[in-house]
Amino acid sequence: MLGSLARHSFGAILLAVIIEELGQPLPIPTDFMIIFAGTMADHSLPRLGTFYVALTLASAIGASGLYAMVRRARARCDPLGYSHGRRAPRRTAPVQRGLRLP
């Protein structure tokens, strides 16, 4: 992992951030890789800004991919859409009968 990081540096860091945001654990936490990317900026504010924007986009892409995978898996596990209260079947009749006062 460190060898590919040294050879491909920033591209490897972006890929690692996307993979970790997709939910796959990595042997090296991407927090350390992001700190490494900050040290590679060489006291250049435009390069640091570019790293910040690119890492933010990589994180957003990975998180969106994880969201899409979970949403698709939920649709397969729950074909009628009964989760989270949407399109839930009405089961209020027994409750209403139990709450009736004489």
Image: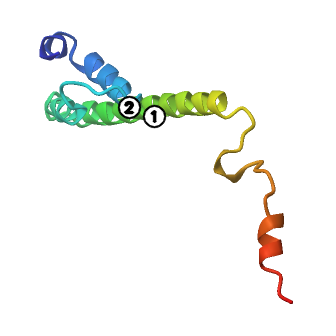
Residue 99, given in percent of the width and then of the height, sits at 78, 79
**Above or below, 54 relative to 99:** above
Q: Is residue 83 left or right of residue 36?
A: right
Dot 1: what SS? helix
Q: Kindly identify which residue carries mark 2.
A: 21
Q: Which color mode does the image show?
A: rainbow
| Residue farthest right in this picture | 102
Q: Kindly identify which residue carries mark 1.
A: 63
Question: Dot 1, crowdedness within 10 Å: few (<14), some or many (≥20)?
Answer: some
Dot 2 amino acid type: Glu
Dot 2: what SS? helix
The quarter holding residue 40 reads: top left
**Above or below, 83 relative to 95:** above
Residue depicted at x 71% and y 44%: 82
The quarter holding residue 49 reads: top left
Q: Distance between the residues labelled 1 and 2?
A: 5 Å
Q: Quadrant of the N terminus?
A: top left
Q: For the image shown, how many numbered marks are present on the structure?
A: 2
> Which of the two labelled residues, at mark 1 and mark 2, occupies the earlier sequence position?
2
Q: Quadrant of the C terminus?
A: bottom right
Q: Is residue 81 left or right of residue 61?
A: right
Residue 61, given in percent of the width and then of the height, sits at 46, 29
- Circle 1/circle 2 CB separation < 8 Å: yes
Toward the viewer: 21 or 97?
97
Residue depicted at x 72% and y 32%: 79
